[in-house]
Image (spheres, helix red, strand yellow):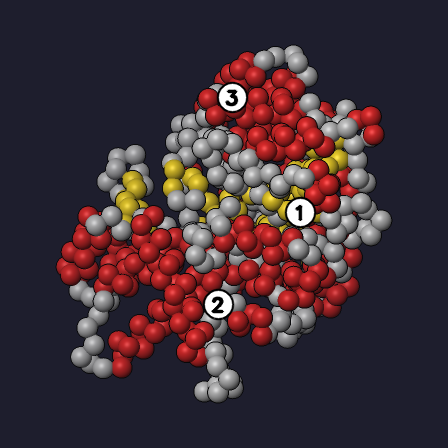
Amino acid sequence: MHAQLAAGDMLRVLSFLEECGAELETASELHDPAPVFRMALHAIKGHLEAKVMTPTSLIAASNVPYATANRRLREMIEAGLIDQRPRTKSGKSFSVHPSDRLLEQWSQMSGRVRRLAETHFNTTDRLDEARDYYFGGSYMSARPIPPLQVLPEPLRLAGGMRVLVHGDPTFMVMENLKRQFEQAVGVPIHQRAFSIDRLRDEALRNAERMTSRYDIIALDLPWIGEFVEKGVLMPLDEAMDVARLDPADFHTAGWKAAHWGGRPYAVPAQTTPELLFYRRDLFAEAGLEPPATTNQLLTAARRMHDPQRGRYGIGWNAARGTALGHTVLMAMADFGQPVLDLPKMAGGFDTDGLAARDYRVTIDTERGLMAAEFLMELLQYSPPDILSMSWYERVRPYAAGRIAMAYGYTLLAPYFELDPSSPAHGQTGYLPHPHGPGAANVAPVGGYAMGIPANLAPERVEAAVEALCVFTSAQAQKLYVQNGSRTNPRYSVGADAEVRRASPIFEAVDAMSWRDELQFWPRPPVPEITGIIQICGEEFHDMLRGLQSPRAALREAQSRAEALIEQARPS
């Protein structure tokens, strides 16, 4: 999203404009329809909600005769307001998208509309105390998110609700609150938690069964493409009215990451970008500014690195396999290099066309080499056990005061935020990944979504939908935060005053969303992504161990990833 307005706020302003337009058009039979306005509004809403739009859908939204709308649409394309992209290899079918120019114009206008609305209606002499309008953040701040509500009728599920999750702090909070959620849904909840690799294996095994053992499954966001192509997940729009979820309230990157081929398959349960944690007190003592670039990060790591005193510059995921593979993809993103040949777009790279499966690997590139050499330099200022350090191991020593900086997901922040004895408690700053030359700051979006298995028994689907709505609701998300979670997929939760008081991390992440730094393209959710991550985690581990050069690691990873995609590509 552009810097002027966060996506959730912009969508609300667009809905407000849409409703105002409808009111004006019905107010007088002499009102002249505005097809360009309506088509632009429809295009931008569709873009923000990750919907595939066609010329036909824009024409239908215009509210004018077909010939007139078609002419106006051609004018918008010629004026550079609407972009067309081929949907098929033949090039005969196109999807339509708002151009960067149109997005910029409407983002600025949305900000002005919101401020005008607040100026004219948010006054002491209220026209109607019972009014229910929402103008930007004022509605949120005035009305805190209420407690979790009990469903009007308990769910009817033989044997209770069965949920497969990841064994991370957020889902463990949910386990600790199990009795409260059981009261809300009216049935017992049976939750199984696995580590990341075992979770994927179990979800894939479950898809091969005649009938799913689970009513809801959690999945890492990059798995969406694989799980859809292998028939693991039921399309959400087939199981429910997706509008019930309030899609505009989700962080745009998290919501779009739960789509494949333009359809939603899961609901973000935790949006947890990987950030750079740094000790503000140590930086102040050293007279250092928070690092914005990779060169500044290396300088700070060098200054902070003091093994003689038992302190190291930085911790990161460097364990062989999955852990280091994630680091490689994110380091490449720091230098502006996606792992696949994604087309550039405003704010990063476009992932909308991934379902066509016509992408190629882009690991062995000049920017890939810059990322590899950056990791080699980072190694010099890391703890001696860095090559076995993964998800939790990189943050525990940071919490203990043995590391000055650490790359870590927000879900790991409780290790120091909730421990008053930690030297990092109350002294941690949160930054997006520092960027390399010519690149932009990125906070790679991670976390988990929750979906419904495609092979769930039909009689259980309705109850699974109801439970999914409860578990991912704003009320539930606020409850997770109040009980120690530091992840949040919803704008409304991040704006809640009680949530903001719980941790500075929520305000920091919201600011990154405003600056368009929350991105999920660093780990594009293609079916082969798990294999690509594993390959990078193996080849680059050999590089870090000194068994091969950076160029050799890039060459081997590129070759193996190309072979993997070629083997998996549909014939």
**Image quadrant containing the C terminus:** top left
The x and y percentages for residue 363 are: 49, 24
Q: Residues within 10 Å of mark 2 (few under 14, many from 20)?
A: many
Question: What is the spatial separation of the Cα atoms under label 2 and label 3, in whole angstroms?
Answer: 43 Å
- What residue is drawn where x is 39% and y is 53%? 47
The secondary structure type at the circle numbered 2 is loop
- What residue is drawn where x is 52% and y is 67%? 137
Residue that numbered label 3 is attached to = 369
The x and y percentages for residue 479 are: 70, 63
Residue that numbered label 2 is attached to = 136
Residue 428 can be seen in this image: yes
Residue 186 located left or right of residue 458? right
Residue that numbered label 1 is attached to = 429
Residue 11 located left or right of residue 525? left
Q: Quadrant of residue 88?
A: top left
Residue nearest the viewer, comparing 354 with 227: 354
